[in-house]
């Protein structure tokens, strides 16, 4: 008896996922560029002429803000790396296959989290 369960997505389905990933990649790279620009553009608030005590507070919050932007940028870079790895899996035709169970990851999950390598079944087992 023939096994009717699919072991991989069709080329047409892979193309659909590729388009989703490329769009997410475009947006992610724009956001990263924006974050990087704000990091290289300190003191855009123009508080150079304010009093000394306020300046100290301002420096502290600027440092905190810079750390937060750095964290966001690092997270964004990781997201971009994950999306690019997903594109490689599409090229290899291994995209959408759970690395734990070997089964196909549901389309709904892939549309929501296109860089995932785990099915919900495998994800829930981690907890």
Image (tube, helix red, strand yellow):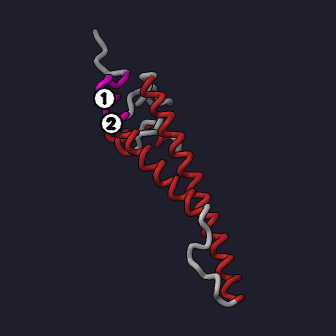
Q: Position of residue 22 (x, y in %)?
A: 40, 39
Q: Which residue is mark 2?
A: 107
Q: Does dot 2 land on a helix, a strand or a loop?
A: helix
In the rendered view, does 70 fall on the left or right side of 12?
right
What are the residue bounds of the magenta stretch? Answer: 8-19
Q: Nearer the viewer, residue 52 or 114?
A: 52
Whether pointer 2 and pointer 1 mark residues with C-beta atoms closer than 8 Å, the reply is yes
Residue at 29%, 26% (x, y): give it.
12
Tell me the quarter of the image containing the N terminus. Answer: top left
Looking at the image, tell me whether mark 2 or mark 1 is earlier in sequence order: 1
Residue 75 lies, with reference to residue 3, above or below; the image says below
Q: Position of residue 126 (x, y in %)?
A: 53, 42
Instruction: Report, in whole angstroms, how far the alpha carbon at label 2 lies from the one at label 1.
Output: 9 Å
Q: Position of residue 58 (x, y in %)?
A: 65, 80
Q: Residue 39: within the magenta?
A: no
Residue at 32%, 36% (x, y): give it.
107
In the rendered view, does 28 fall on the left or right side of 60?
left
Residue 44 lies, with reference to residue 121, above or below; the image says below
Q: Which residue is mark 1?
A: 13
């Amino acid at each position: 008896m023939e096994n009717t369960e699919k072991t991989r997505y069709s080329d047409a389905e892979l193309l659909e996922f590729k388009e989703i990933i490329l769009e997410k990649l475009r947006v992610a790279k724009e956001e990263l560029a924006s974050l990087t620009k704000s990091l290289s553009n300190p003191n855009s608030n123009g508080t150079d002429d304010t009093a000394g005590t306020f300046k100290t507070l301002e420096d502290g919050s600027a440092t905190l803000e810079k750390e937060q932007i750095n964290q966001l940028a690092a997270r964004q870079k990781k997201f971009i790396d994950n999306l690019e790895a997903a594109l490689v899996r599409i090229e290899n035709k291994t995209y959408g296959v759970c690395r734990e169970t070997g089964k196909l990851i549901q389309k709904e999950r892939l549309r929501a989290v296109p860089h995932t390598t785990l099915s919900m079944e495998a994800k829930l087992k981690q907890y």
